[in-house]
Image (cartoon, helix red, strand yellow):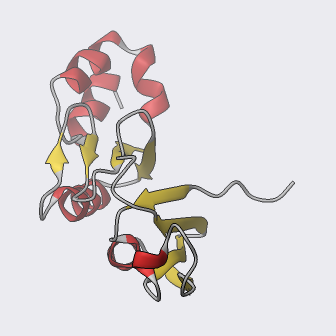
Amino acid sequence: MGQITPFLWFDTEAEEAAKFYVSVFPNSKISGVTHYPPGVPPHAPRDGQVMTVEFELDGNQFVALNGGPEPKFNHAVSFTVPCRTQQEIDHYWSSLAGNGGQELACGWLTDRYGLAWQIVPDFVAEIPRSEAAMKVMMTMTKFDIAALRQALGK
């Protein structure tokens, strides 16, 4: 079986979003761009415009499509970014939530395109095993690794 590749639906911002994501994550690149062919209904109004953008974020393949204004992203699907350090959390948090994104609770945010992300410490799976760590986590918007480690007794 081949790799599972997320396919992200945008209105007209696929290339802009791909360039943005590639700028945020290390070891990332845009690997291909296709355009709408001329005169193909129902896409004729998009003749020659970018149709898809293939890109890679730190080794993970994605495809972005300029498919129209509907459907919109929602929180039913999110991407988790495990971070080893507070510096990594701070970087991804400010990069993805900035410029029109929205900070949510417990490490969740949406970026300016409406895509949901979870910016979490790489030990996040340990937190539910500790009532103290869960209580601390539930008070946070952006995760504080030092406070979570203290609650875990690490």
Please say if 31 is above or below 68. below
Classify residue 60 as left or right of residue 125. Answer: right
Quadrant where the C terminus sits is top left
Q: Residue at x 49, y 67 (%)?
A: 64
Left/right of residue 87 with respect to residue 73 in the rendered view: left
- Name the residue nearer the viewer: 144 or 41: 41
Across the whole image, how many numbered discs are drawn on residues?
A: 0
Residue 73 x, y percent position in the rendering: 36, 46
Identified at 53% across, 74% down, the residue is 52
- In terms of image quadrants, where is residue 99? bottom left
Q: Residue at x 21, y 41 (%)?
A: 144
Q: Is residue 140 above or below residue 5?
A: above
Q: Nearer the viewer, residue 92 or 83?
A: 92
Q: Quadrant of residue 9?
A: bottom left
Side (left or right) of 88 relative to 129: left
Q: Is residue 97 visible?
A: yes
> In the displayed image of the protein, which residue is found farthest to the right?
1
| Image x and y of residue 137, in percent | 25, 26
Residue closest to the eye, 54 or 105: 54
**Depicted 43 relative to depicted 36: above or below:** above
Q: Which part of the image, by quadrant, shows the N terminus?
A: bottom right
Q: Residue furthest top?
A: 131
Where is residue 88 drawn, in percent x and y? Answer: 31, 60
Residue 27 in view, yes or no: no
Q: Which residue is rendered at x = 28% and y = 54% of the image? A: 89
